Amino acid sequence: MRAERDVGAPAIAPVEAAKLDARDTRGDRLAAGRVALGAVVVLYLAVVLLGPMGALVAEVSRIGIGEVLSAVLAPPALEALGMSIALVAISVVVNAFVGTIGAIALVRHRFVGRGLLGALADLPLAVSPVMIGLAFLLLVGREGVLAPVLEALDWKIVYAFPGLVIGTLFVTLPYTMRELAYVLEEIGTSEEEAAATLGASAWQTFWHVTFPNVRVALGYGLLMTAARALGEFGAVLVLGGSISGQTQTATTFIHDAVEERALAGGYGMALVLGAISVVLLALLEHLKHRRARALGRTK
Amino acid sequence: MTARSNAEGSEHVRTADALLPGPGQRALRGLALAYVLVLVAIPLATLVVLAFADGPPVFVERVTDEVARDALVLTLGTGVLVGALNVLFGTATAWVLTRYRFPGRGALSALVDLPLAVPTLVAGVMIAVLYGPSSLVGTTFAAWDVEIVFAKPGIVLALLFVTLPFVVRAVEPVLAEIDVAEEEAAIVLGAGPWRVFRTVFFPALLPAALSAGIRSTGRAIGEFGSIVVVAGNIPFETLTAPVYVFGEIESGAPRAAAAVSTVLLVFALALYVGATWIERKVGARHAS
C-alpha cells in the first residue's frame, strides 16, 4: 500500500486513496481471474462437448450431403430408424401410464412395499445397460432360467422385438415416475383435498385438479423417456443382437456401420439422432421454463 | 389397511382414497409394484444369483481373472478421475453460467444439457471423429506420440461428455441461492476473492458438487455405448468392465459376465447410496 496513515494530518483523504488504490489492483487481479476462469470453462466445453459436435457436422459435410443422404435413406437405415421410433412410441405410452400410477402411489399412498417401489424405480439409473441386457438374457434367453416355459409357449423374447421392448422399458423406467413424483410432492395435497371436500369424485379430482398441475412434468418426463429410448444402445445390442431388418435399431445400425467403415451411413445416422436430440432438448428447455413458472405459482 | 392406523399418514390416505378409491386403488398400486418387480427386481436378482451359482470360489476366480481384474481397475480408476474432473470443471462451468453475463449464455447453458439427450453411442462417434487417429487433432497429437482415441484419454473424454450435466446442474441452483448479502459482508470485511470463495461459497457448494460428482462416477462405471467406439477395447489397455461383460456374453460365458457385473453393481449401488446420503443430509439442513 502506498499511503500510510498519518496521525497529525486529516486521516480521511489518504485512507480513502489507499482503499481506492488497493481496490484497483485487487480489481485488476479479480478481473484477470474472471477472464481466466471464463476462458478455462469455454475451453473445457469446447474440448468435451462443442468440438466433437462440430466435428461430426464437418465430417458429414466433408463426406458429402448426397452420399450421406442416400445412405441414411437406404432401406436398412430406414428400417433401423423405424424400429427405434417404434420403441420410443411404446416406451412413451407405457411410461405415461405406469409412471403416473407409480408416482401417485409413491407420493400419495402409504403402503407396505412403498420404499421398495421407490428404490426399484431408481435402480435403472445406477445399472449399466449391458448388465440389464445380461440380466434378461439369463432370465429369458435361449439358455435362461425361464427358457423351458418360453419354449413351451413358443415365445421368442431375446433376439426378437419383445427383447428390444423389455430392454428399452427397463432403462426408461425412472424418468417419468421420478419427475411426476417430484412435482406431486412439491404441489402438495391442499387442492386435491379441496376438490374432494367439494364432492368431486376420484376421477374428477384427478382430471381437473391433479392432472393439470402435473401436465408439464409429465411432458418433461416423457420427453426424457423418448430421448433415452431413442439413444439406448447396450441393452438393445445384447437383447436384440442387431439383426438387420429385424432387431437393428438406429444406434446399433450406427455401431455396425462404423465397424464396417460404412461411414456415410454411420455418421449420417449419428447426425440424424444428434439432430433429433437437439430438438428434444429444445422442447425440454421450453418445458423447464414453464415448469419453473408453474411451481413458482403454486407455492 | 395398515396406513389408516398411522395418524401421521392420515392426511395422505384421505387424498389417496379420493384419488384412486377402493379396489381400484389397490389394483393400480399393485400394478405399479408388479411392473417394477418384473422389470427390475427379478432380472437383477437372477443376475446376482447366477453369478454365485457355481460357488463363491468360482465367483472369485472369475472376478480376479487377469483381464477381468484389469478391466475393473481401469473402469473404477477412470470413473473416479472423471468424478473429480466433473467436480472441478462442473463447478467452474456452473459459476460462469450463473455469475457471468455474456451474449449466448442462455444457449450455452442449454447446450450443457445436451448429453442428457444425445445417445451415448453418438457421443462416442463425435469424440472419435474429432480426436481419431486420422483426424486433424489426432494426427497433431500423434506427432507428439500422444494417442487419444483407442487409448485412455479417449475413454476419459467420452465419460466427461456423457456426465457433463451432472455437477453443473447440481451446483447451479445452490449458487443462485447463496445470499448476496453474505458475499458482500465478506468483501466489506476485507476478505480477498479467494477467501470469499473459501468461506462463503465452498461450504455451500461442496455437498452438491460432491454428491453430483459421485453420481457421475456411478454413471461412468456403467458407461458402454460411447466407450465401445472410442476405447478400442484392448485387454490390459483400454478394455473397460462393461465392454468386458459384453465380450463375455458374446463369447458364450454369461456367468463370468454376471460375476463381473455383480461387482460393478455393488460399486454402483454404493455410489448411489453415498450420493443420496449426502443429498438427504444437506436437504435436512436446508429444511431446518
Image (spheres, rainbow, N blue to C red):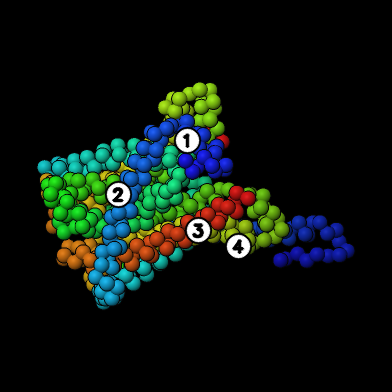
Q: CA distance from mark 1 to mark 3?
A: 28 Å
**Which of pointers 3 and 2 indicates the residue nearer the eye?**
2
Same-chain status of marks 2 and 4: yes
> Percent x, y for residue A224?
35, 43
Label 4 secondary element: helix
Q: CA distance from mark 4 to mark 3?
A: 24 Å
* Residue type pointed to by label 4: Arg
The mark nearer the N terminus, 2 or 1, is: 1
The mark nearer the N terminus, 3 or 2, is: 2
Q: Residues within 10 Å of mark 3 (few under 14, many from 20)?
A: few
The mark nearer the N terminus, 1 or 3, is: 1
Residue situated in front as seen by the camera: B224 or A133: A133
Residue in the image at 16% along x and 66% along y: B251
Give me the chain letter of mark 4.
B
Q: Is residue B194 visible?
A: yes
Give me the chain letter of mark 1.
B
Same-chain status of marks 1 and 4: yes
Instruction: Return the residue at label 3.
Output: B277
Residue in the image at 30% along x and 39% along y: A94
Looking at the rendered structure, which numbered label has been put on residue B16? 1
Q: Residue furthest top?
A: A199
